Amino acid sequence: MLKIGCHVGNSGDLMLLGSVKEALSYNANCFMIYLGAPQNTFRKPVSSQRAHEALELATSNGINPSDIIVHAPYIVNLGQSDPDKFDFAIRFLTQEVEQATRCGLKQIVLHPGAHVGMGAEYALRRIACGINQIIENTKYSSVVILLETMAGKGTECGKTFEEIATLISMVDDKKRIGVCLDTCHIHDGGYDIVNDYEGVIKNFDEIIGLKYLGAIHVNDSKNPCGAHKDRHENIGFGYIGFDTLMKFVYDERFSNIPKILETPYVDDPVVAKLSYPPYKQEIDMIRKKEFDKVLKQRVIVEK
């Protein structure tokens, strides 16, 4: 069965229950959330998530709780040298794993971090050390930390399959570590998925191992291959294109893996700063396996 969904909100009084309702409104059967605002580290008590109601609603509508993925916020960086900030990142990410566990969720996506001038080798050791500590702090949990493949913007770590494999090799508990492959990121990072899809997948398998793949972020890119920019585009409207992205979506090797859209909202042509989620229309297009060149117009008309 195709597992296709998107990033949805998680806020207000409904919290995770509202997330499920939003995902269902797009006809999604998996989705991804933040546990709180991604720009800060404030988190409501886990009781506020309404997780029991949310998972009941999800299950009754064909969404397996294991296909609800948490994304850690970008503001914490395990790759830095500052000891206070490093310790804070460990404490905060430990709390994120704890809350995901108590909500009944199974996977959390993490941007590995950036070396901010100390060099990638130093940062990779630092990141692995932090992940080991987080896993040690949550030994009671089975939540898997998924390292996201990055585009190589600035001093990001995880921009190559080799760097991801190095991180995995330094994590003690291999059952608690995995990978989230982002199509825009690997394209912008220099992997030619358009002209050599099978070669890139073979490379991933040989260097990292497909057994570690836990989720796929399906995004088109506003930039050519190797740009190291990380600017997502709507499905079929970028440099990757519809046909290549459908290879990821419908690859039988990935049939049991959640595919998550993180594509940009469509701007209102008249009202400034007003935009609309494209996910219902994109999911519909993906299920039909046919590119809709007027999708953005449909999003505005059907808002």
Image (tube, rainbow, N blue to C red):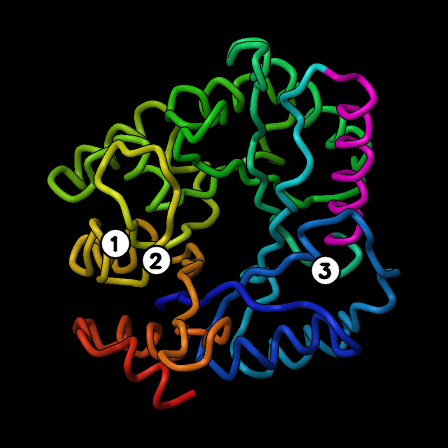
Circle 1 — which element? loop
Q: Which residue is mark 3?
A: 104
User: Residue 82: which numbered mark, if any?
Assistant: none
Is residue 252 or residue 230 the one in the foreground? 230
Q: Residue at x 43, y 87 (%)?
A: 303
Relative to 141, is 245 above or below? below
First along the sequence among labels 3 and 2: 3
Q: Which residues are magenta?
A: 82-100
Identify the image quadrant of residue 235: bottom left
Q: Which residue is mark 2?
A: 255
Q: What's the CA distance linking mark 1 and mark 3?
A: 28 Å
Q: Is residue 249 magenta?
A: no
Q: What's the CA distance linking mark 3 and mark 2?
A: 23 Å
- Give the percent coordinates (x, y) of residue 265: 43, 68
- Give the percent coordinates (x, y) of residue 276: 45, 76
Identify the image quadrant of residue 19: bottom right
Identify residue type, mark 3.
Gly
Residues under numbered marks 1 and 2 in contact, where contact means CB atoms less than 8 Å apart: yes
Q: Which residue is mark 1?
A: 251
Relative to 220, is 50 above or below? below
Identify residue type, mark 2.
Ser
Main secondary-structure element of the magenta-colored stretch: helix
Identify the image quadrant of residue 198: top left
Identify residue type, mark 1.
Asp
Neighbourhood count class around disc 2 (C-alpha, 10 Å): few under 14, some 14–19, many 20 upward: some
Neighbourhood count class around disc 3 (C-alpha, 10 Å): few under 14, some 14–19, many 20 upward: some
Q: Residue at x 53, y 65 (%)?
A: 31
Q: What's the CA distance linking mark 1 and mark 2?
A: 7 Å
Q: Is residue 84 magenta?
A: yes
